[in-house]
Image: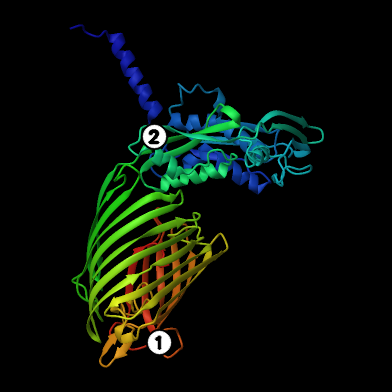
Amino acid sequence: MERATRSEVRRVVACCMALCVATGPLWAADVQMNPLQDEDLNSALRGGSLLFEQTLLEENKPSTAEVLAAAQADYKRLLAVLYDNGYFSGAINITVDGREAAAIPPVQPPGSINRVKIAIDPGPKFQFGRARIAPLAAGTELPEGFATGQTASLGVLKNTVSAGVDGWRAQGHAKAALVAQELTADHPNRRINAEMTLDAGPKLRFGPLLIDGQSDVRRQRIIDIAGLPEGEVFSPEEIRLSTERLRRTGAFNAVALSEAEQIGPNDTLPIIAQITDAPKRRLGFGAELSTLEGGTISAFWLHRNFLGGAERLRFDAEISGIGGSSGGTDYSLSARFERPATFNEDTDFYALAKIEQLDEVSFFSRQLDLEAGIERIASPERTYTLGVGLRTAETRDAFGENKYTLLTLPLSATFDYRDNPLNAKDGYYIKADAMPFVALSGADNGIRTFVDARGYKTFGTARPVTLALRGQFGSVYGPDLSVTPADYLFYSGGGGTVRGQEYQSLGVAVGSDTTGGRSFVGLSAEVRVGVTDSIGLVGFADAGYVGEEEFYDGSGTWHSGAGLGLRYNTAIGPIRLDVAVPTSGPETDEDFQVYIGIGQSF
């Protein structure tokens, strides 16, 4: 074995010490920037600076090498901010403990850094002189800032080019591009003259969809699901829709559609689909605990590509009401099969079977449901379903025991224009269900309808206030109350209807017992106030009505509740805590109710 010389040892020790200095922690260096008269520019510069971003780190403080790298990167970043705000003759100096950051070798960072100073002289603000881009497609809307006399922003220039190119692409010119630009600065007059030339290229039609990547989903099924209109005029919107159709199957982890570099025969443009399969099988479990409704355990098994055509097969099992005080124990077992793009690219087929037992406070039901139908996705916001089903059940309620078999025709329409389903600030949501049923035995013919409508409006930005309103309306038309299927009737009370009132506490009195009603109205209002980015307060009031009649006529009974809530925002939606008390209606045994969940109450 050879022994290291003394000089070699010294070199190793020196290198280790240098490495420790270079990567050692920084003890909160002071970062300063000279204030500018333009407050908006001040804010933009601070927001674009890596140095100021580092000062916000509470953990993993940057090393001296990282601080130096950030200082040297800030020259370009801050210059881009100046250009984007119309300052084209600015000067930037960044000093690290008095030394210009650009002059410090990155491989030899200081042993420590105490102060970093950013000195910026933005110079005069420039405006657009000549501002021209041509040729433009009919109907192209350019940014308002691209005009003589407006601030000469680099961002406006980029957006103008994008708008011009997109205008041509929307009319089928997929290869439209910027081919020439002339930007000149007139410093004495503080003007930027911009003249840009576009080339629209030929008008193209969609060519074939080419699959790039290995997939267990059959190639023809991928083409059918994407629904790309081969032979029709090119449209970016059609590419977006095809991408969304493939993603919503759940069969793929990643989907990206891109245009081929070369134009095909007869002015056609092939589209390349890059896809990666998602894991075929998934197994999940869940558990919940409620002081009122007891415990719930659930499990599911999912197959994402059951027959090789992106079909989904899912089994669900759930036991709820374990140890609860809102009835007995409920059981359900279901299987659902879905096949995307069955009749066309936006119409899916589904079939389901479900066995369920409900042991509620006012009724007991054990039923089997078989159903098949189609789901039409008209747009990301609008969905319609049409099905046909068979239901057979045994029920027990205030009117005694009953067995019935129904042929059903479930219909629904959903309009979801909320900005965020879990924490909506603006927009509206409407879901309307109608289910005509023909009694094969044990009941009468009729129709059950239910509408859930919600609206949201937010005021202010610093501490936003959101007003949320909800209305629910239900009706069973046709059979008398005594022969209406017990699980088709309506109750009120609990987290989904009237908070503060006990679960399903309001119904229709039948002697000393209670049953559900054939008509229902639920009204809710919330005022949500954002205290911080993470914490919000909510004040709410709910009211519910249940009547024996088929449609609301006021002869039934109302009850209401009100309370306060706390919200803590997370990445998966706000954690909700509501405390509510009853404010009107029949007397209850409880003084208040507590509700905990994820997502807003509606």
Nearer-the-camera pick, 29 or 423: 423
Say which quarter of the image contains residue 549. bottom left
Closer to the camera in the image, 322 or 391: 391
In the rendered structure, find residue 34 and report the number of the disc placed on it. none
Residue sitting at x 76%, y 37%: 132
Q: Does 515 sit above or below residue 127?
A: below
> Which residue position holds label 2?
25
Q: Residue at 26% x, 63% y: name it.
A: 354
Which badge, 1 or 2, is on the more N-terminal residue?
Answer: 2
Q: Is residue 459 above or below residue 262?
A: below
What label sits on residue 549 in the rendered view? Answer: 1
Q: Quadrant of the N terminus?
A: top left
Q: Residues within 10 Å of mark 2 (few under 14, many from 20)?
A: some
Is 374 on the left or on the right of 114, as rendered?
left
Outermost front residue: 440
Mark 1 or 2: in front is: 1
Q: Is residue 588 visible?
A: no
Q: Quadrant of the C terminus?
A: bottom left
**Residue at the spot 39% in from the left edge and 73% down from the top edge:** 436
Secondary element type, mark 1: loop
Q: Nearer the viewer, residue 124 or 126?
A: 126
Q: Residues within 10 Å of mark 1 (few under 14, many from 20)?
A: some
Percent from the top left, x then y, of residue 341?
Answer: 42, 49
Give the image location of residue 109, x and y in percent.
46, 25
Per the model, the C-alpha gap separating discs 1 and 2 is 74 Å
Which picture quadrant has residue 101?
top right
- Whether the residues at callouts 1 and 2 have beta carbons within 8 Å, the answer is no
Horizontally, residue 468 falls left or right of residue 39, namely left
Residue 33 on image: x %, y %: 59, 40
Name the amino acid type tagged 1: Glu
* Residue at image coords 42%, 32%: 63
